[in-house]
Image (spheres, helix red, strand yellow):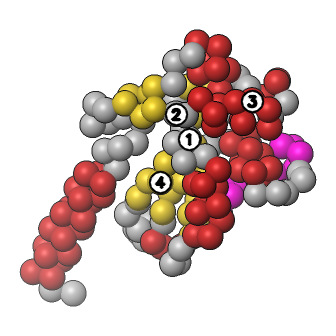
Amino acid sequence: MSRVNVKIDRLLNFIYKSDIEKLNDHLPTEFKSLKDIASNNSYTIKSRNGLDIIIDRNEINLLCNLLPSDLHDKLMLPIIFLRRIDLGRGIYELLGGKVEAFTILKLLGHDISPENITLPIRIYRPQLFKLKTILPTSIIIAFSTPIEEE
């Protein structure tokens, strides 16, 4: 590859990454536990662009009823799914730990204990749409750049 092509590739990669960063301005700057949100009646979380992410109270109640009480302080909201182009079309990867994975799998109808979950959890677009109808304000989609090969 010529030096000019390498420079053009680097420039295009820089532009692409900056566009992805702009697309992700809606992501939270912090996460709150389900317990904190439910006990403090504070349903807002700040996003990178300075706006509030408002999580619906009914979703908090649903999650409180869905999960055992000992997991309420471990589930961090909002739940983020990463759209990774390098995985293929319509595949999303859950960002988070076993408690978030347990919650998602339970919502999708799986009967599994948190100890038996293997990370990462990847789902397809129809599953994400189902989850977004159940938890429209608690689930956020993020976008990523393809993983660069060394």
Question: Label 2, label 4: how many angstroms apart (C-alpha)?
Answer: 15 Å
Quarter-of-image position of residue 68: top right
Q: Is residue 114 toward the left or the right of residue 101 in the image? A: right
Q: Give the mark nearest the N terminus, 4 or 3.
A: 3
Residue type, label 2: Ile
Q: Secondary structure at mark 2?
A: loop
Q: Give the mark nearest the N terminus, 3 or 1.
A: 3
Q: Residue 71 at x, y = what percent?
A: 78, 28
Q: Give the mark nearest the N terminus, 2 or 3.
A: 2
Mark yes or no: residue 99 visible: yes
Q: Residue 28 at x, y = what percent?
A: 42, 36
Q: Residues within 10 Å of mark 4 (few under 14, many from 20)?
A: some
Which image quarter is the C terminus in? bottom left
117 inside magenta stretch: yes
Q: Are marks 4 and 1 in contact (CB under 8 Å)?
A: no
Magenta extent: 113-122
Q: Are marks 4 and 3 in contact (CB under 8 Å)?
A: no
Compared with residue 89, is residue 91 higher up or lower down, i.e. above or below?
above
Q: Residue at x 35, y 44 (%)?
A: 26
The residue indicated by pointer 1 is 138
Question: Label 3, label 1: how many angstroms apart (C-alpha)?
Answer: 13 Å
Viewer-proximal residue, 17 or 11?
Answer: 17
Q: Residues within 10 Å of mark 1 (few under 14, many from 20)?
A: many
Residue type, label 3: Cys
The residue indicated by pointer 2 is 55
The residue indicated by pointer 3 is 64
Q: Are marks 1 and 2 in contact (CB under 8 Å)?
A: yes
Q: Give the mark nearest the N terminus, 1 or 2.
A: 2
Q: Residue at x 13, y 76 (%)?
A: 8
The residue indicated by pointer 4 is 141
